[in-house]
Amino acid sequence: MFRIQTMNKISPAGLELFPRDRYEVASGIPNPDAVLVRSADLHALEIPESVLAIARAGAGYNNIPVEKCSARGIAVFNTPGGNANAVKEMVIAALLVSSRNILGGINWGKEIAGRADEVPELVEKEKSRFEGPELKGKTLGVVGLGAIGVMAANDAISLGMDVIGYDPYISVDAAWNLSRQVARADTLEGLLAKSDYVTLHVPLSDTTRGLIDAEKIRFMKKGARIVNLARGGLVNEADIIEALKGGKLSAYVTDFPSAELLASPGALCIPHLGASTPEAEDNCAAMAVRQIMDYLESGAVKNSVNFPRCRLDQHSPFRLLVVNRNIPNMVGQITTILAEENNNILDLINHHRDDYAYNIIDIEQRIPDYTLKRLMGVEGIIRVRAIEQGV
């Protein structure tokens, strides 16, 4: 029986996927095999030694101490694409409200609500104050062509926009799904120079923090608009505010408000609603649950943020899973111990990611506890697990 601890309210659409005869799921389970989390901050918590995996029902994982988990052999999963459609729809809304001054018009309408019979005349007289350009025929620059960026690019094409994409690390899956009408930019600066609108869809890291700053804004068209529903830290906020004041930017739409942005004309702040739909919560929960089940039951790794993607068709009921540091001769030491124990290897896969490697090994016989202890005694091996299926 696998034990799953939930750290937040997780959508029933995900939790109901756990077979009740093999999984116990609750918020107060001691010594869980895996943890399901949404926004709970795990940095200050003591993660039990029993935990094999942590799954975040969402794309971001800043609330999980990934480096500490890696050092302990804990796989950390997220759910990229689970909320993609929800965020994509918010991107389209952001493009429209940044152009047409819809919010300004709505707020002005509330101000004149008490003027009764004057309202129709005032509307006709003042509506020109809130006019703005159409999206059709304008150029949208999409920075980052993951699940959300691809969907935003494709839908913008359907709206009649010209779309330029920039992503030097685009995946094969994303490339297959991207419209052929999306032009490729060789550099970020080239994309910025051609775009009337720019939408950001890259993860926040040391290399992307402050990606859009005064230097980059200098390349942009006067009056351009930026949409940032990815991460607040992707832009230099002070430079954005200065560009809005000076008229270099017409609008900045963000899902990450700050006091300074809220006070800045031209900044349209959404209270982090990009993925706030019941459909997105259901999708992310279901993805997280499936990934945990795959990992616990077969050792398969998909959408991990710290382990390499790894899957092996099962050739035996007996499977060995090994997490180790990515250093020379690790596979050789593992196979030598198995050979000394007269346990024949039927199939093996070894993948690495940065400082860590992961092995799935199918063998002929059940692995005794003393063999697992011998493997754990090898310098560089972090975690060893044996699983059996259909025995």
Image: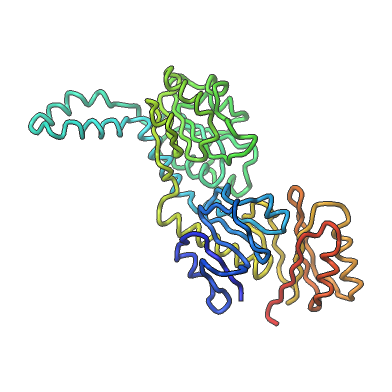
Q: Is residue 387 above or below residue 261?
A: below
Q: Position of residue 313 (x, y in %)?
A: 71, 68
Residue at the extreme bottom of the image, as rendered: 391
Residue at 48% x, 51% y is 83
Q: Is residue 42 above or below residue 232?
A: below
- The part of the image, by quadrant, that contains residue 339 is bottom right
Q: Is residue 318 visible?
A: yes
Q: Position of residue 180 (x, y in %)?
A: 54, 40
Residue at the extreme left of the image, as rendered: 117
Q: Is residue 357 above or below residue 370?
A: above
Quadrant position of the C terminus in the picture: bottom right
Q: How many marks?
A: 0
Q: Position of residue 203 (x, y in %)?
A: 58, 41
- The part of the image, by quadrant, that contains residue 91 is top left
Q: Position of residue 367 (x, y in %)?
A: 80, 76
Residue at 58% x, 39% y is 204
Q: Is residue 181 visible?
A: no
Residue at 89% x, 61% y is 332
What is the image's colouring? rainbow
Quadrant position of the N terminus in the picture: bottom right
- In this rendering, position of residue 51 left or right of residue 143: right
Residue at 55% x, 79% y is 21
Q: Nearer the viewer, residue 378 or 187?
A: 378
